[in-house]
Image (spheres, rainbow, N blue to C red):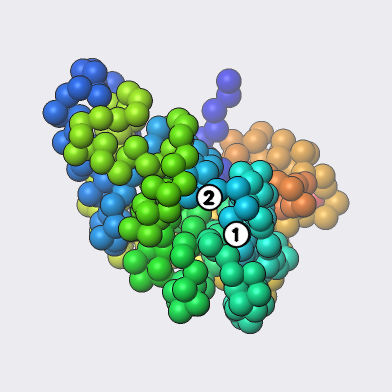
Amino acid sequence: METYPIPLVPGPVRVRPEVLAAYGRDFGSADLEEEFFALYAATTARLQRILQTRAPVVVWQGEGMMALWGALKSVLSPGDRVLAVATGVYGYGIGEMAAAAGAEVRTVGLDYDRTIGDLAAVAQAIGEFRPKMITAVHCETPSGTLNPLADLGRLKHEAGVPLFYVDAVSSVGGAPVLPDAWHIDLCLGGSQKCLAALPDTCFLSVSEAAWEAAAQVRYAGYDALLPFRDALARRLFPYTPCWQATSGLHAAAGAVLAEGLEACFARHDAVAAHCRERLAQAGFALFPAPGAVPSPTVTAVRVPENIAWPEWDRRLRRRGLVVGGSYGPLAGKVFRLGHMGTQADRGLVDRALDILEEERRALP
Ligand SMILES: *Cc1c(COP(=O)(O)O)cnc(C)c1O
C-alpha cells in the first residue's frame, strides 16, 4: 500500500508517535490487573478534563460508530420519541439509526451547508412531539461545519426534555465541547480524530439522567452502556478491554492536556482560518453557506468545475497529498481537508495548499 507524505484526511488522522509507542509495550490480562483499572480511571479522568465535565466518562472498545449506536440502543425503548436536529450526513443518519433502533423519530433539518441558528422550528417540534431525547451533531465532518449547541442545550433544559445526545466525534480535542454547560446527557467522542490515536476506542460522558434511562431500558449487548456504570468499582468489565488501546488513548488525551486546552483550540482555529483564507485566495469555493459556522477541525471545499472528483483525487495523490472525499448527497461534489489533531499544522496545510493552488491553475 502506498502512503502519502501530506495526509489531510479528516480522520483517521496521522497518529501521534507517543500513541504508537504505547502499542509496543506488553501488558498483562487487562480485565484482571489493578494496573489496568488504574490506567482506565486515569484515562477517563483525562477525558473528563478535556470535556470539562463532572459527569463520568466511559471508554469503549471500537471506533466512533460504536459510541453512536451503543448510546442510542442503551437509552431507547421501542416507541420512544426522538427529535433529530440535522444539518448533515451524521445528523440525518442518527435519526435513521434511532428509527432502526425502534424509536419514533421526527427530524428538524436544514440543508447540509447550514448550521443550527434560529430554534423556532425545534421549539415547536418539542412542544408538539414531546421527545424523550434530542439528538444533534457538533462538527458535521462531511460538511465542514460546527453547530453551535449552547442555545439548543438551554432549550432542551428549559423544555424539560429528558435527554440530549450529541455526536462530538470530530470536535472533541479540537474545539470546546462542554457537556455540562450545554446540558448534554450523552456526549460522544472518538479516538481517531482530534485526539490523533488509532480508530479503536470511543468514549462518552454520561449524565445521571442518561444512566437512569439506561437502567430502565436495560439494553443488553456488546455495546450496552449499563455494565459500565459500576465496571470499575466491581472490577468487572463486560469484555476484555485492550490494554494497548486504552494506553494509546491515555497518551493521546495526555498530549492534548499537556499542550493546554486553550492553546490546542487556538491552534485549530488559526490553522483553519489560514486554510480557508488560502483556499479563497486560490479561487476555491468553500462548501458551507455564508452565515454557517465553519469547523475549526475540517474544511469542506467544492470540487473545481471542469474536473470529476476521482480525477482530482488522483492528481492530488500523485503529488503526495491525500484529502477526504465526501458522502451521501455531497459525494463527488465536495472534498475535505482534515486539519485536526496532528494535522492542525500550518506547515502541513501550507504544503497542501501549494499543491492545490498549482493543480487548480493547471485545470482547463
Ligand atoms: C468520524 C465520525 C464518526 C465516527 O465514524 P468512524 O466510523 O469512527 O469514522 C461519527 N460522527 C462524526 C461526526 C464523525 O466525524
Q: Secondary structure at mark 1?
A: strand
Image coordinates of residue 175 in percent, x first then y, are 41, 62
| Left-right relation of 74 to 300 | left
Q: Determine crowd level at label 1: few under 14, some 14-19, many 20+ residues with C-alpha closer than 10 A.
A: many
Image coordinates of residue 32 in percent, x first then y, are 20, 22
Q: Quadrant of the N terminus?
A: top right
Q: Is residue 308 visible?
A: yes
At a point 21% along the width and 18% down the height, the residue shown is 28
Marks 1/2 in contact by CB < 8 Å: the verdict is yes
Residue 82: mark: 1
| Left-right relation of 130 to 343 | right
Q: Secondary structure at mark 2?
A: loop
- As shown in the figure, which amino acid type bears the numbered disc 1? Val
Residue 76: mark: 2
At a point 47% along the width and 62% down the height, the residue shown is 163
At a point 74% along the width and 52% down the height, the residue shown is 330
Quadrant of residue 113 in the image? bottom right
Between 360 and 226, the residue placed more toward the observer is 226
> Mark 1 or mark 2: which comes first in sequence?
2
Quadrant of residue 267 in the image? bottom left
At a point 51% along the width and 35% down the height, the residue shown is 5
Q: Is residue 294 visible?
A: no
Image coordinates of residue 291 in percent, x first then y, are 63, 77
Q: Is residue 191 above or below residue 176?
A: above
Q: CA distance from mark 1 to mark 2?
A: 9 Å
